[in-house]
Image (cartoon, rainbow, N blue to C red):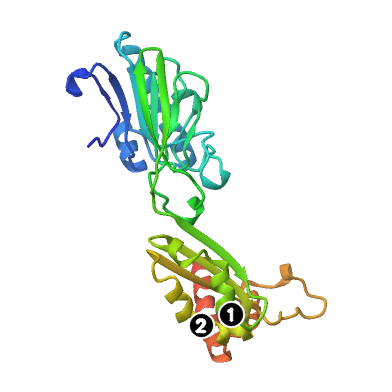
Amino acid sequence: MLDRPQFLGPADLWDVPVQVIALPWVSRSGMMAHLDLPGGDPGQIYEQLETKLSGLVQNWIEQADPNLPIILTAHASVQGAKYGGERTVMLGGDLVLSGSLVKNPKLDYVALGHIHKPQNLNEGSHPPVIYPGSIERVDFGEAGDDKFFITAQVARGQTEVAWRQLKGIRPFVDRRVKLSSPEGVTDQLRAALPPAAQLREAIVRLVVEYPREWETSLDEAAIREYAAEAFEFHLVKRPEMESRVRLPEGQIVGSLSALELLDLYWKSNHTEPEAIETLQALAAEIIRGESEA
């Protein structure tokens, strides 16, 4: 297992005629130590790391055997890549490799890990820059995602890739229901889910919204029995507030302190007065500690 950036040639790879530039996942402190960088502002540190890594990779590319293909492997984020939910990787918040680094045409294949969304960041051009994604769904943000693995024919200056969809992976079922009546609640919940047979070995989440006064109508045991064949079943109850605490005449939210806002929150959530007193005291202690830090 590699613990630092390395260049590997055929002698390191059981005489396979290929060259690999390997950038494993390394902590910020570990990478700083390896590249002999001083401490400082995190944003500046990441910028220096990216500059150092770019220079390192470029030097290895220039020193490589021009007759053998070069594969870059990296466990990292790349600028322009998309996470699930279409969130795009941006520079500044973490160590992020630049698009120009991984799209260098002297590379023949770029194999990326870290982001679960399958994507080719250099579609239609050489080299392929590919996140194949995770082989299993890992959270409900990936509930509707297909999963793949890649086969690649890598040659100097020409690489062909094929996406192979994985079948039979564990399904995620994510459903939400807002109860329309306190009558027949269990039937409403069952109707929100697929047939029980389709829940077998699935990871299931059911979010239920309802007025707080209907709490006693919700038979949790019955719905858990219905979903008994699921690998995991998460019942998320979202009782709605009956009423809101009105602000005093002439006051706006921005004029209230954090403790005053918390007090309004506890009251709107129907928290017992004794509990409010305890919670407010704890909150005051935390706020005081933060202001003195």
Instruction: Give the residue at x 39% y 18%.
Output: 108
Question: Badge 1, how many Cα within 10 Å: few under 14, some, many 20+?
Answer: some
Instruction: Give the residue at x 40% y 26%.
Output: 110
- Between residue 195 and residue 73, name the one nearer to us: 195
Instruction: Give the residue at x 43% y 42%.
Output: 147
- Which mark is on residue 233? none
| Rendered location of residue 112, percent (x, y) | 39, 33
The extreme top residue here reads 67
The kind of residue tagged 1 is: Val
| Quadrant of residue 11 within the rendered picture | top left
Q: Are marks 1 and 2 in contact (CB under 8 Å)?
A: yes
Q: Is residue 263 left or right of residue 152?
A: right
List the residue tagged with mark 2.
Answer: 219
| Rendered location of residue 93, percent (x, y) | 50, 43
The extreme right residue here reads 250
Which sits earlier in the primary sequence, circle 1 or circle 2?
1
Q: Is residue 19 left or right of residue 104?
A: left
| Rendered location of residue 144, percent (x, y) | 51, 50
The kind of residue tagged 2 is: Asp
Q: Can you say which quadrant of the picture contains the N terminus?
A: top left
C-alpha gap between disc 1 and disc 2: 8 Å
Question: Badge 2, how many Cα within 10 Å: few under 14, some, many 20+?
Answer: few
Q: Is residue 293 visible?
A: no
List the residue tagged with mark 1.
Answer: 185
Q: Secondary structure at mark 2?
A: loop
The extreme bottom residue here reads 274
| Quadrant of residue 129 within the rendered picture | top left
| Rendered location of residue 249, percent (x, y) | 82, 80
